[in-house]
Amino acid sequence: MASISWKTTWVFYILLSLLRLVSPVDAACECGYSVNSTSDPQHAVFTDLLESDFTKIKNFQDDTDWQPQVWELDPKAALGPYGRATRLESIIPNPAVNISVNSRGIYGGHSGLNLLVPKDYTVIKGEKYLIGAELDSTRNDMFYGTFRIGYRTTKWAGTCFGFYWYHDDKQEIDTELLSREINMTHTLLNLVLHTQVGGSNLEALPGTFEVAALPYNSSAEIHELRFDWTPQAITWYHDGQQVWTISNTTLFPQEAGHLVITHWSNGDPLWSGGPPEGNAALLLTYVKAYFNSSDLKRKEDHEVRCEAVGGIDDGGSGNDKVCEIPAQMGPPMYDGVAPQDLPYFFSNDLSRNATVNQTVYEDTKKKTNGNKMGGGSGTGNSAWGPAAQVSCFLWILFLVIMPMFTGSSFGQMMLS
């Protein structure tokens, strides 16, 4: 029986290793995330995501998707009897003991991120200030998108909760809840599109301001606020139900911006009211944002990864690589539900590898227990198309195996 040469043995092992190396990556969502199915005429596809599951984050400053703000406005600038200030101490994480079992936080109560407005004023430079909190998204390249937040308002009257997309005071898509406008039977939503003129119900252009009444107390359980911005319309939703839409596109923002979450009071009886009679905590359980990026590099990244799986503009197989965003219908549920029925995050779905080449954290060294499982361009989490895999395989095969049989190094072959 003829013996197998060492060269043949090495070739076998190299081929096996290379086949493993270039095996297809089982991935999803390379072509983006859609509101409604791509077969629905009303669908919209967005290229990028930002997902924050606040029920899992222990040290909020490690979540580099968000930038806590620290600033002060004196009473005159704050337009109230009190000044406004934001502090890091007003951002209080309360991660779940075990979110797959129940929603209880490690400090008691419901898990999530609390934005606190204390009942007592603080004296700064001889004047009275009310302390609050503000979070701005690190990414400021958001142009069109669907933006969603899980929240529960405070039970104490006298604060304002704002969730909005912002470029400047003349380009802003705003949602605000005043805790003084919440009672046992209803909650009012103040919805504003800030344009060249506007910003309040007293100054807004006709058709840019709406007050929507919700038939329940938003401080009793978790709810979801959402607004979608497409080239055709800006539409607000609450627990999946449409509450208002604007279709006058001449009023729409023209530049990219970022997300802002605020909880504050300045004592103004015509708006925030307050100060609150108790320590007022706004509870946040998540933010989910799916949007188009204005950044040229991110646009190119999306085109490359989508074209590698067939593209979507020409009806190619890339349509199968657009992931439909699950719609939240009714209040988000945490207690008494199976783990798969908790609010869904693409970035936590390891089985689908649903955040291919998405940069979820700017600095992967700062991940906490609330880390996102996608990875960015520097993590090697990308999906090659079949043609690229075959080309790479053949090239490596040529470089590694041919010298074994020719007796020449690669350099010698190139120079001969």
Image (spheres, grey):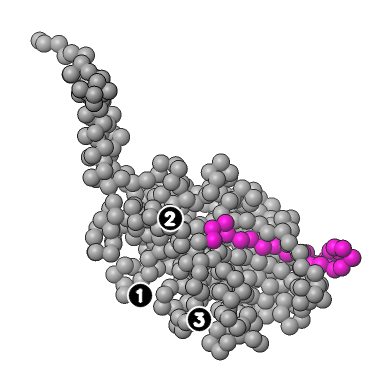
Say which residue appears at 57% left-offset and 73% top-offset: 172
Toward the viewer: 129 or 373?
129
Placement of 352 over or under 155, stated as above or below: above
Toward the viewer: 107 or 164?
164
State the residue position of label 3.
251
Provide residue 54's location: percent of width, then percent of height. 58, 56
State the residue position of label 1.
42
Residue 352 lies left or right of residue 85; in this view the side is left
Dominant secondary structure of the residues highlighted in magenta in the image: strand
State the residue position of label 2.
298
Name which residue type carries label 1.
Answer: Gln
Q: Are marks 1 and 2 in contact (CB under 8 Å)?
A: no
**Visible residue check, residue 366:** yes
Name which residue type carries label 3.
Answer: Leu
Q: Residue 174: name its quadrant.
A: bottom right
Provide residue 269's location: percent of width, then percent of height. 76, 81
Q: Residue 40: name its quadrant.
A: bottom left
Q: Secondary structure at mark 2?
A: helix
Find out whether residue 277 is within the magenta segment. no
Residue with the most extreme right position: 126
Pick whichever of labels 3 and 1 is earlier in the sequence. 1
Pick whichever of labels 3 and 2 is earlier in the sequence. 3
Find out whether residue 134 is within the magenta segment. yes
Say which residue appears at 38% left-offset and 69% top-offset: 44
Toward the viewer: 101 or 227?
227
Which segment did they paint magenta? 118-140
Placement of 382 over or under 103, stated as above or below: above
